[in-house]
Image (spheres, rainbow, N blue to C red):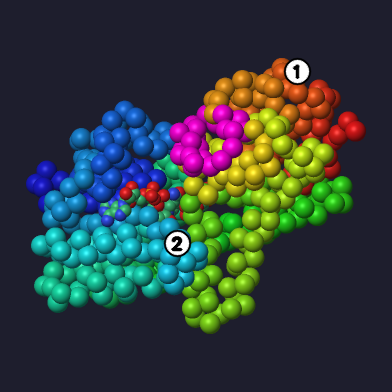
Amino acid sequence: MSDKFKKTILCIGAGYVGGPTMAMIAHKCPQYKVNVVDINPERIDQWNSDNLPIYEPGLYEVVVSARNKNLFFSTDVEKGIKESDIIFVSVNTPTKTFGVGAGMAADLQYWEKTARQIRKYSESPKIIVEKSTLPVKTAQAMERILTSKGQEVHFEVLSNPEFLAEGTAIEDLEHPDRVLVGSNETPEGLKAREELVDIYSEWVPREKIVTSNIWSSELSKLVANAFLAQRISSVNAISRLCEKTDADISEVAYAIGMDSRIGSKFLNASVGFGGSCFQKDILNLVYLCRSYGLNEVADYWESVVKINDYQKESFVMNMLTAMFNTLAEKRICLFGFAFKANTGDTRETPALYISKKLLEENARLVISDPKALPNAKKDLDGINGEITYQEDPYEAAAGSHAVAIITEWDVYKTLDYEKIFNSMKKPAFIFDGRNIVDHEKLFNIGFNVYAIGKPALTHF
Ligand code: NAD
Ligand code: UGA
């Protein structure tokens, strides 16, 4: 611990969660020194530059306010561990791609490596905070690894899952709905819990800081994501029924959302949910249920992912059917590649599935996005077919047979669609995978308009 500061915090993993979360803690708590380490030197260089590794509104200002004062980014994991009193583990926990549980279980190799490093380099007692999303009971495994050398050093493991959403990370961190801290219910566990609560209390109202036993905390994170994703799959499932019955999903969602027991948020029908967490966390939950022999419970949650896959497939099938069952040689423009607006992140984006399917139909793809083109290029690298990347949406749409809106970026809501229509091949099609444009207006301009869960507006 360095003298100038009350305590030294370390975060292992400088990704979408570790970077913004630690920047916010450092910004709000100048009395704590916050070190952030990562094994990826390129990422650390970017955190130390003006060109941060992730796009997140408001992030730059928060980072700059604390960087090199009480916020430091480095690759020196050993030094970071030795210096720290509290260690947040915020490494990636993707879906396993090999061996037992492939395609379902969480891949805990990065998490386990950090546990072993902490054990190896620690010379003083520490609080270890699980920030990554992990299967319930992981804290037990963490404790077993940390104490397996019969060390003198005491480690107290806490669970403090992160609920921020990308694109609104800074707002979510600054004004969270709640902060959850789970601990062992022993005197040491409760003391460690209070230390973490003290940090958040610097800016989060005390009544929003929820404490629980450690297993409830671990499980609550998976369940929160499963419930959120379930809402989207529920509304998306009904959107398909709307398309068959001339009902309008926006009207249905509005009507049901006004019931305060249901609530109006997270009912936007879409081309399907993406992002690095919903699918992986539900699959993780499904795998856990199966491993406890709860097959019916597992099937129930797995259906949320199946509906999501079906929604993405249906979007492409609708395009193919509407465009006379052939897309070969047709120029098709995607508006948006990120998995949601206000981020450059493309992990599990529906755009990737859609791009691959369109390329299989021999369509010529033009991809446009305000922030995600570098990631889109990496994702589509090596995939057969003609792909052009064009940030300017007017240039991207010119000469196209169809425009498909994949990401709900604000910029796509206010484009001059008359100009776009005039530059396109006829008949011109628009497929609104986010229901964000004025369909009636576009139809009157001359487009054939296909939205999610709404009657198609066509000139045929
Ligand atoms: P990420 O891939 O962006 O970041 C993880 C970082 O950890 C990477 O930079 C990687 O290099 C680093 N890392 C891996 N092993 C390491 C090691 N041994 N030592 C040092 N660094 C190491 O992932 P993310 O999106 O930040 O997610 C991290 C965790 O937070 C996941 O468990 C995820 O489920 C959870 N989560 C993510 C979000 C989100 O919006 N992305 C929100 C809530 C929770
Ligand atoms: C989600 C949760 O919202 C966070 O609380 C959680 O911390 C995070 O996962 C995580 O654990 O990683 P995120 O994936 O960043 O956050 O973004 P969301 O806003 O939840 O959007 C997820 C996907 O659902 C996006 O593709 C989005 O476009 C889609 N979505 C969202 C819809 O299709 N309809 C909606 O009504 C809302």
In the depicted view, which residue is nearer to us: 169 or 190? Answer: 169
Structural crowding at the residue carrying mark 1, measured as other residues with C-alpha within 10 Å and reported as few (<14), some (14–19) or many (≥20):
some
| Left or right for 304, reference 251 | left
Quarter of the image where one finds residue 181: bottom left
Q: Position of residue 264 (x, y in %)?
A: 67, 49
Q: Which residue is pictured at 69% across the width and 42% down the height? A: 361
Q: Secondary structure at mark 1?
A: helix
Q: Is mark 2 within 8 Å of ligand 1?
A: no
Q: Say which label, 2 or 1, has the lower sequence index.
A: 2
**Residue 96 to residue 12: above or below:** below
The residue positioned 23% from the left and 51% from the top of the image is 10
Q: Residue furthest bottom?
A: 293
Q: Disc 1 beta carbon < 8 A from ligand 2?
A: no
Is residue 193 visible from the viewing direction of this image? no
Circle 2 packing at 10 Å, graded few (<14), some (14-19), many (20+), is: few
Q: CA distance from mark 2 to mark 1?
A: 46 Å
Mark 1 lies on residue: 422
Q: Is residue 79 above or below residue 153?
A: above
Residue position marked by numbered label 2 in the rendering? 97
Where's residue 459, x and y in %?
Answer: 88, 31
Q: Secondary structure at mark 2?
A: loop
Per the rendered image, the range of residues in magenta is 365-388
Q: Residue at x 77, y 31 (%)?
A: 429
